[in-house]
Amino acid sequence: AARLQAEKFDIALHLYSDFWISLATWMAGIRTRIGPASKLARIFYNITLEQKRSRGNRHEADYNLDLLTPLAIPPVRKSSLPVSDEFFTDDGGLLDQLRKNVGVFPGMGGSARNWKPEKYATLIDMLAKDWINVILMGGPAEEALLDTVASLATAKPKRFIGRHLKELVAVTKRLDCFVAPSTGPLHIATAVGTTAIGIYCPIRVCLPQRWGPIGERDVALMPDVPVCEECETECIHYDCMDKLPPEKVAQAVRERL
């Protein structure tokens, strides 16, 4: 609260209602405090908007842009992120100047269903046969997953472990295409102008219509099964993620290179 008060902000716009952050903006005396009316944190806002995000029938970006309405600011449905070249020097020959460079990022935080490692390995082999420079990517906590994917692939892809978020951003900017499940780095790709291909599950709260990448050439791919409310091993479509073939993802990459 003291840090916020020192900045003398006029408006606090809460895209996500966190109780303690909302309390801090109130304690800081910020005059205009805008946020969704769906959680307890709303008691600290003086302007609220009713939103039914749990229904998942609109994109998260659009829900957030709606919060600009009280400020009479026209929404711009496009993300952008500045990239500093100082955070990446390709001393290790990660990128290939003679070929297309495609990043495959198999990790995620577990908020949705994901492909198995062997699916990512098959995708890597398919892309490598097309003379594409495939870069297997992840964060420090995902090294074991990358080891597994790499061990299952016949082609041995180059590997990048992002030790710093700005380094990940700088590398992603230099790619021709980026493949990942529903995770933050997928949206980073969109924001830096790299074509993003997302791998999504059919659970209603996880659908790409709410969480998919929003770039003009981006695409979100799902298994061809009905939308469900939650994943159950007794489901007749289980494991439906196996029904999204790597060839379909590889073809989406080819069409965008």
Image: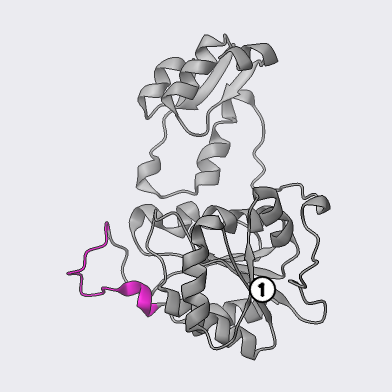
Q: How is the protein colored in the picture? A: one colour
Q: Secondary structure at mark 1?
A: strand
Give the residue displayed 58% in from the left and 29% down from the top.
69
Reading the image, the residue beneath label 1 is 102
Residue 45 visible from this viewpoint: no
Give the residue displayed 36% in from the left and 78% down from the top.
242
Q: Which residues are magenta?
A: 229-243
- Is the residue 217 above or below the residue 129 in the image? above
Residue 15 appears left or right of 8:
left
Q: Main secondary structure of the magenta part?
A: loop
Considering the image in quadrants, where does the C terminus appear?
Answer: bottom right
- Is the residue 114 above or below the residue 79 in the image? below
- Is the residue 12 above or below the residue 133 in the image? above
Q: Nearer the viewer, residue 207 or 166?
A: 166
Q: Position of residue 17 (x, y in %)?
A: 45, 29
Residue 174 appears left or right of 9:
right
Q: Position of residue 253 (x, y in %)?
A: 62, 77
Q: Nearer the viewer, residue 190 or 150?
A: 150
Number of callouts: 1
Q: Position of residue 225 (x, y in %)?
A: 33, 73
- The residue type indicated by label 1 comes to Val
Q: Residues within 10 Å of mark 1 (few under 14, many from 20)?
A: many
- Is the residue 253 above or below the residue 73 in the image? below
Residue 1 drawn in magenta: no
Residue 242 drawn in magenta: yes
Q: Position of residue 43 (x, y in %)?
A: 40, 16
